[in-house]
Amino acid sequence: MPATHEITDIVEKVKTRLEKARQRGIDLDVIEWRCDEDWLYIVIVPSKAGVRASDHANLMSQIERELRDEGIDKVLLVPALSD
């Protein structure tokens, strides 16, 4: 399991990428994260109505690939809907 400061850094990288996507009209936010064994799960929800599911899924896949390219493995972005 990654150390707490590593988790914080990874979550911040994801938030930064989500902020860039927001400028393109894809409004998503991190609402929580948790570790299970060696994996970090980061839950992402639309921050407002109207985000297409395909945009949500495509962006999360792109971010996961970018993290792997940086050598950050075992991170899964989990799509969810807010209540």
Image: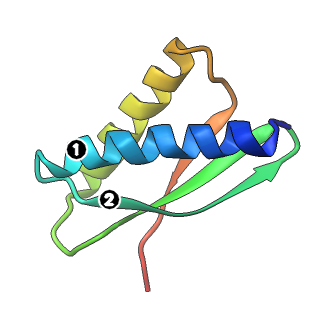
Q: Secondary structure at mark 1?
A: helix
Of 8 and 56, nearer the camera is: 8
* Residue in the picture at 11% in, 53% down: 25
Q: Is residue 63 above or below residue 73?
A: below
Residue 51 rendering spot, x and y as whole percentages: 20, 62
Asked if residue 51 can be seen in this view, the reply is: yes
The amino acid type found where label 2 is placed reads Leu
Q: Residue at x 46, y 23 (%)?
A: 65
Question: Label 2 near label 1: C-beta < 8 Å?
Answer: yes
- Position of 21 relative to 63 (above/below): below
On the question of residue 76 being in view, the answer is no
Residue position for label 1: 21
Left or right relative to 73: residue 79: left
Q: Is residue 19 left or right of residue 33?
A: left
Mark 1 or 2 closer to N-term?
A: 1
- Tell me the quarter of the image containing the C terminus: bottom left
Q: Which mark is residue 28?
A: 2
Residue most toward the bottom?
83
Task: Give the spatial CA distance, label 1 vs label 2.
Answer: 8 Å
Q: Is residue 39 left or right of residue 11?
A: right
Q: Position of residue 8 (x, y in %)?
A: 64, 46
Answer with the quarter of the image where residue 58 lies. top left
Describe residue 66's horizontal placement relative to residue 17 as left or right.
right
Q: In the rendering, which numbered label is found on residue 7?
A: none
> What amino acid is found at the position of numbered circle 1 in the picture?
Ala
What is the crowding at mark 2: few (fewer than 14 residues within 10 Å), some, or many (at least 20)? Answer: many
Pinpoint residue 41: horizontal percent, then vertical percent.
65, 49
Name above or below for residue 53 compared with residue 70: below
The picture quadrant where one finds residue 52 is: bottom left
